[in-house]
């Protein structure tokens, strides 16, 4: 029969499977349940056609989920296909723009049959880095959710308690949560004495700072516009509920950071990542989690920079040629490497000098940071390739004497 290709159109309830041979003929197209029984049926289908691990390529529009994990654990070659690629490939053969789950499974199988060499196989990451990936993304998602809740809190306070915004510019700190929970309305806050505020600050971990307590008392006693008493009380209840949510999120974020630190420390590449300028536990975990640790996934530094979005992209047609920033990228990874580049300005003289050089050459702040992030990724790739830690003098060697003298002139 020759080589067989498999396409799976997945959903939360069931999966449509299509098998085609190397000539494009349909071999099978069953539907399986999204259960252990359905997975067993899929394995039986593969066994029926003698499709063993290593002999079958499977295309699917995701790289996550139990089905993908089970297939990868069984040893099958998984090709996660971008849904946009599937949509474009579908239009090559169906101009009427028809669509169905069964047809999409066939499209995936045919796409792999003709263009497998243009798509990347699912990375063979270790279990350790897959666990880091879950922790890093959960941590970042919680931070984003907390930002949304804090913005809601700011909006509510601005409608009835503007003095709280003056007292606490950062509403995520424990001091703000403790004081506003004890006095969620302007009336209650104005009644707090300096001694009571001192005790609240002590409870929040600030120590007994009478000067800070006096400042808060002054802010809370300043006259502001007020809502009717009943409305003010309702706002206070709403703010109390939000403060409880934010406090719980902060506790969860702190707990995840401890888990990330422990999990990162157990990974063999941790010393290399921690040695990079601007990388602490959180950023190092995010970058390692997004890149993974498959030694064959990134053949060169350019592939890493392209995935992160720090490498520029060229658009050329006729005499027109345009080089722009790359916006189709792993956004979580780009955020992390950009943050690393910004932090590296304070810890690496070489990084600072390169950034200043780019600004002098005419780059804006973001463009210079993006170029610096690309440089740092190239250095990270070198360190991982040769299993060495970062060294400032080797990462940013001085220019040759001739070049240095020309620059001085």
Image (cartoon, rainbow, N blue to C red):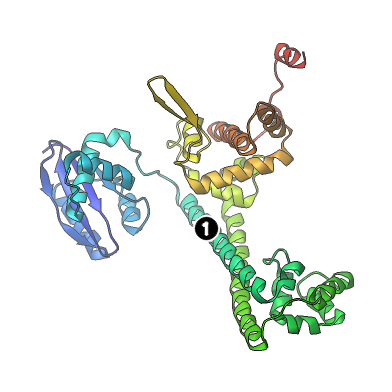
For residue 385, above or below residue 74: above
Left or right of 129: which side holds 173? right
Q: Position of residue 247 (x, y in %)?
A: 63, 72
Q: Position of residue 245 (x, y in %)?
A: 58, 73
Q: Is residue 245 visible?
A: yes
Left or right of 302: which side holds 62? left
Residue visible at 67% across and 77% down in the picture:
160
Q: Quadrant of the N terminus?
A: top left
For residue 390, above or below residue 130: above
Q: Nearer the viewer, residue 204 or 379?
A: 204
For residue 363, above or below residue 280: above
User: Which SS class for mark 1?
Assistant: helix
Residue located farthest toward the top when viewing the structure as drawn: 402
Q: Quadrant of the C terminus?
A: top right
Q: Is residue 55 visible?
A: no
Q: What residue is disc 1 on?
A: 135
Q: Position of residue 340 (x, y in %)?
A: 63, 43
Residue located farthest toward the front when viewing the structure as drawn: 225
Residue located farthest toward the right when viewing the structure as drawn: 211
When asked about the image quadrant of residue 396, the answer is: top right
Q: Nearer the viewer, residue 130 or 365?
A: 365
Mark 1 neighbour class, 10 Å CA radius: few under 14, some 14 to 19, many 20 or more: many
For residue 262, above or below residue 154: above
Left or right of 254: which side holds 77? left
Residue visible at 43% across and 46% down in the picture:
125
Q: How many marks?
A: 1
């Amino acid at each position: 029969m020759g080589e067989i290709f498999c396409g799976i159109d997945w959903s939360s309830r069931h999966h449509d499977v299509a098998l085609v041979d190397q000539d494009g003929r349909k071999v099978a197209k069953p539907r399986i349940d999204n259960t252990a029984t359905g997975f067993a049926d899929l394995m039986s289908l593969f066994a029926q056609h003698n499709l063993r691990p290593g002999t079958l390529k499977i295309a699917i529009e995701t790289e996550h989920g139990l089905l993908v994990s089970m297939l990868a654990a069984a040893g099958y070659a998984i090709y996660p296909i971008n849904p946009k690629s599937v949509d474009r490939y579908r239009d090559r053969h169906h101009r009427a723009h028809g669509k169905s789950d069964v047809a999409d499974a066939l499209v995936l199988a045919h796409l792999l049959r003709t263009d497998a060499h243009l798509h990347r196989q699912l990375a063979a990451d270790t279990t350790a880095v897959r666990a880091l990936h879950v922790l890093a993304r959960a941590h970042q998602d919680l931070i984003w959710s907390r930002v949304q809740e804090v913005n809601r809190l700011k909006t509510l306070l601005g409608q009835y308690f503007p003095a709280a915004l003056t007292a606490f510019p950062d509403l995520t700190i424990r001091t703000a949560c403790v004081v506003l929970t004890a006095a969620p309305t302007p009336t209650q806050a104005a009644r707090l004495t300096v001694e009571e505020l001192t005790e609240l600050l002590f409870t929040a971990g600030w120590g007994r700072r009478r000067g800070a307590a006096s400042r808060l008392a002054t802010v809370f006693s300043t006259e502001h516009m007020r809502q009717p008493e009943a409305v003010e009380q309702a706002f206070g209840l709403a703010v109390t509920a939000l403060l409880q949510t934010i406090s719980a999120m902060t506790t969860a974020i702190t707990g995840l950071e401890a888990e990330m630190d422990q999990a990162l420390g157990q990974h063999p590449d941790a010393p290399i990542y921690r040695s990079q300028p601007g990388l602490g536990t959180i950023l190092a975990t995010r970058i390692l989690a997004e890149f993974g640790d498959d030694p064959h996934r990134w053949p060169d530094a350019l592939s890493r920079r392209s995935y992160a979005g720090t490498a520029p992209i060229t658009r050329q047609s006729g005499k027109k040629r345009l080089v722009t920033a790359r916006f189709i990228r792993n956004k979580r990874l780009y955020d992390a490497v950009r943050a690393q580049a910004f932090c590296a300005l304070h810890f690496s003289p070489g990084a600072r000098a390169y950034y200043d050089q780019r600004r002098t050459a005419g780059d804006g702040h973001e463009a210079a940071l993006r170029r610096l992030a690309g440089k740092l990724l190239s250095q990270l790739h070198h360190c991982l390739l040769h299993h060495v830690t970062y060294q400032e003098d080797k990462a940013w060697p001085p220019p040759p004497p001739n070049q240095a003298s020309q620059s001085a002139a």
